[in-house]
Image (cartoon, rainbow, N blue to C red):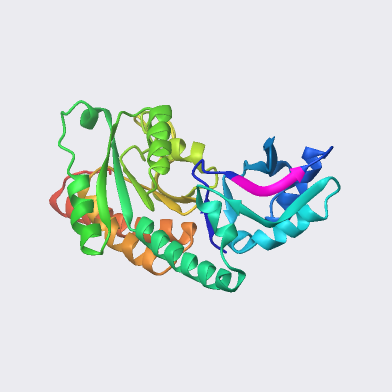
Amino acid sequence: MPELDLLAKSELWVVGVRLVDVDLTALAAVAARVLGLADDEVFVTDVRGDHVVFDVVAPSVDLSAVAGTEHALLDALRTFPGVTVAPGASIHSNGVLGVIGAPPDQAEAIVANAARLEDGLRAYVARSVAVLSTGAEVARGEIEDTNLAAAQELLGAAGYRVTGGGVSPDDEAIIAGRVAHLLEDGHGLILTTGGVGAEDKDRTIEALQRLAPDLSTAVLASYAIGHGRHVKPHVRVGCGRIGDTWLIALPGPTREVRAALPALIAGLSGGLAPGALAEAIAEPIRALWRAHRATAGHTGRDHAP
């Protein structure tokens, strides 16, 4: 069922009610149950004259449990010891809780319309992409970041709205903080590029694991620890979800980003789970590396991605 984000408009005024020696905590619990909330999510914050004010501390409420419940709430208050409800009593709110006062015969239509709006909003958010590039050279401006342009071209052609999420140095805490900030901005997909290798400076996968401990990864290449600058056994891509947001970690080279994005688009459209999606986007990168190795071997040049 759709939920209403209360957006700080969380007070309900019940006008036409008088209280005499009433347990306000118990009264708030009665209101909470009518609204489908826990007892500790509703408080009485003001009582004066002929009105009482309830404050809902839950960040959101189930629309189907709230719409058209004015009469039910007044009836519940009417039966509470010490409460007198006048014949013309009513409930008001300056916020979205105002749907409590909707006529009961319209409640079903209100819920249905809200569900359609919610579906539309979810679909809109799902198409919003932020690209965060990582790497000291990129952060210092020594290397041009062409990954954002590649994502805008390929994801944009598939109907996504792609914006830049900034550039981060190879610092695990900073990357995690930048991604957390982008999560708050409401993107359906956060794409990081760079920092997925086997060297100590490569910290993007670890940064995303701080936010999504169950992040799925797929191996692009394996190395013996201590071989060269390698301190980790694998080069990996990563895929995970936090709520409705996808986290995708790709390598830094733009040719590899371009190779992976069509598989990412297809995998998202096909509803792949994170583990399967990680494998799907890893395979075209592996194929690119295999082709490069074959070419390097044919020409007598060595190459290690």
> What residue is rendered at 28% in x and 62% in y?
262
Judged left or right of residue 83, residue 222 is: left
Q: Residue 21: x percent and y percent?
A: 84, 37
> Is residue 126 positioned above or below 110 on the image?
above
- x and y percent of residue 175 in the render? 38, 33
- Residue 28 seen anywhere in this rendered image of the structure: no
Tell me if 181 is positioned left or right of 91 in this view.
left
- Chain part drawn in magenta: 12-18
* Residue depicted at 72% across the width and 48% down the height: 17
Query: Which secondary structure dominates the residues rendered in magenta?
Result: strand
Relative to 257, does residue 21 appear above or below in the rendering?
above
Give the quarter of the figure containing the N terminus: bottom right
Front residue of this view, candidates 4 and 213? 4
Q: Return the residue nearer the eye: 233 or 2.
A: 2
In the image, taking residue 162 as reference, residue 85 lies left or right, namely right
Q: Residue at x 54, y 47 (%)?
A: 214
